[in-house]
Image (spheres, rainbow, N blue to C red):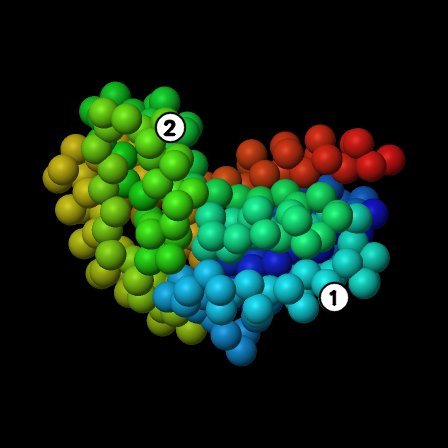
């Protein structure tokens, strides 16, 4: 089957690579929006206009399912997109629930774009799953661009992680798929002091369930 994967930029490549490794018998069609990345500083209405034609192109190309490999799109627009398209949409979203279940210190850190952090869905996730837990939200506003343009500042990453560790974080959530590319840099700083969560494993599990229903 054809699986469409969408992100504003290189975050999609990380997710598409993981899908190809896990599901080698399927064809993966990756679409990015290099002309408009980063999305994480844009308003949802603007993002909706950008993604509709790209999703439509994936549908027209015969995709049986589309993976929304962009937390910014999921947290702001997943309901609109599900109304608009009849193919199943399998989406990443900030892993607040598993992080909250896992923390022993009661402090978690969510790294995400400004648009994700101000979304109603993200507020709902915190309200539903992280009541009584301290959620640190460091300023990662230039990270997607930094990773997209391959000018990664290991110093900026280390400063953020050290600050979070000083505040007793024991779980760090990568809630932007661009940050999957710096997962090992973050883990190099955390060592065994904090777990680092990203959604590719869970996403593939969900994708397998959806594909099984389509055959
Ligand atoms: N990779 C996207 C996400 O998961 C957004 C990056 C951006 O375009 O700002 O949120």
Q: Position of residue 32 (x, y in %)?
A: 59, 67
Q: Which mark is residue 57?
A: 1
Q: Nearer the viewer, mark 2 or mark 1?
A: 2
Q: Position of residue 55 (x, y in %)?
A: 68, 61
Query: Which residue shows up at 33% across the image and 52% down it?
Result: 118
Q: Secondary structure at mark 2?
A: helix
Give the position of the C terminus as an image quadrant.
top right
Q: Is residue 81 above or below residue 167?
A: below
Q: Position of residue 86 (x, y in %)?
A: 75, 48
186 or 37: nearer the eye?
Answer: 37
Q: Which mark is residue 128?
A: 2
Q: Is residue 89 above or below residue 49?
A: above
Q: Earlier in the sequence, mark 2 or mark 1?
A: 1
Query: Which residue shows up at 23% across the image and 60% down it?
Result: 156
Q: Secondary structure at mark 1?
A: helix
Q: Is residue 140 above or below residue 108?
A: below
Q: Is residue 200 left or right of residue 170?
A: right
């Amino acid at each position: 089957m054809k699986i469409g994967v969408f992100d504003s930029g290189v975050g999609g490549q990380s997710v598409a690579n993981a899908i190809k490794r896990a599901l080698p018998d399927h064809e993966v069609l990756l679409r990015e929006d290099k002309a408009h990345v980063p999305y994480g500083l844009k308003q949802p209405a603007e993002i909706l206009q950008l993604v509709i034609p790209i999703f439509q192109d994936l549908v027209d190309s015969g995709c049986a399912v589309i993976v929304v490999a962009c937390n910014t799109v999921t947290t702001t627009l997943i309901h609109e997109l599900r109304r608009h398209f009849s193919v199943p949409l399998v989406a990443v979203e900030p892993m607040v629930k598993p992080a909250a279940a896992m923390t022993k210190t009661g402090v978690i850190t969510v790294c995400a774009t400004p648009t994700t952090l101000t979304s109603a869905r993200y507020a709902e996730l915190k309200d539903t799953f992280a009541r009584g837990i301290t959620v640190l939200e460091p300023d990662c506003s230039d990270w997607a661009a930094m990773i997209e343009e391959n000018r990664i500042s290991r110093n900026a990453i280390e400063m953020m992680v050290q600050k979070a560790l000083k505040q007793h974080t024991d779980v760090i959530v990568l809630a932007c798929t661009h940050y999957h590319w710096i997962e090992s840099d973050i883990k190099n700083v955390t060592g065994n002091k904090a777990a680092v969560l990203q959604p590719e494993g869970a996403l593939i599990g969900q994708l397998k369930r959806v594909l099984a229903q389509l055959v």
